[in-house]
Amino acid sequence: MRVVATFPAPASSLRADAETGSGFTLTVDSADSTPPAGLSPREAVLVGLAGCTGMDVAAILAKKRQAPARYQVEVKAETAASPPRVFTRIVIEHRVSGVVEPEALRRAIELSATRYCPVSAMLSRSVTLEHRYRLRQAGQPDREALVVITGPDRSSG
């Protein structure tokens, strides 16, 4: 895996175009830029986490013959007050609508969090990750549940 970040002249710019080994380009920018020209590096980490766990869960649900009508992953992070302002807690909420068995959803999230998602595994080495879901099914109240907590003080992750 390879990424090259190119900073336009002058080289002190707080914006970079990052090209991946697979040929995609992404602009990253300082969170302080107004207006920002791209996502911040910390946002990019959270995008990677949402995409990684979401793809795992979607694939596992498909293998279990579960077909959500809608699937969304929201990731919220708390940060330390002082530099380097690292993440101190991350909450990942899988939002699912449609005919999906709650146990199938719970197990898919658990497998992603503890076995399959490398981004989750890397972040769990230094920050607590709370993996949750909200399941919306027609004619029923929303179901919300905590699936697993991973992190440096937990046995999972």
Image (cartoon, rainbow, N blue to C red):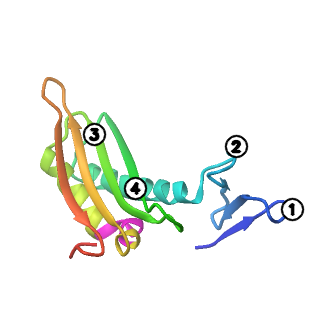
First reached walking from the N terminus: tag 4 or tag 3: 4
Q: Nearer the viewer, residue 128 or 99?
A: 128
Instruction: Choose mark 2 or mark 3, whichever is in front.
Output: 2
Instruction: Choose mark 4 or mark 3, whichever is in front.
Output: 4
Determine the CA span between mark 3 and mark 1. Answer: 46 Å
What is the secondary structure assignment of the residue under circle 2?
loop
Q: Are marks 1 and 4 in contact (CB under 8 Å)?
A: no
How packed mark 2 is, by other alpha carbons closer than 10 Å (few <14, some 14-19, many 20 or more), is: few
Instruction: Choose mark 1 or mark 4, whichever is in front.
Output: 4
- In the displayed structure, does residue 138 sit left or right of residue 56? left
Label 2 sits on residue: 34
First reached walking from the N terminus: tag 2 or tag 4: 2
Label 4 sits on residue: 78
Label 1 sits on residue: 10
Label 3 sits on residue: 96
What is the secondary structure assignment of the residue under circle 4?
strand
The quarter of the picture where the C terminus appears is bottom left
Q: Nearer the viewer, residue 33 or 148?
A: 33
Q: Position of residue 100 (x, y in %)?
A: 19, 40
Region of the chain picked out in magenta, as a range: 115-121
How packed mark 3 is, by other alpha carbons closer than 10 Å (few <14, some 14-19, many 20 or more), is: many
- In the displayed structure, does residue 119 sit left or right of residue 66? right
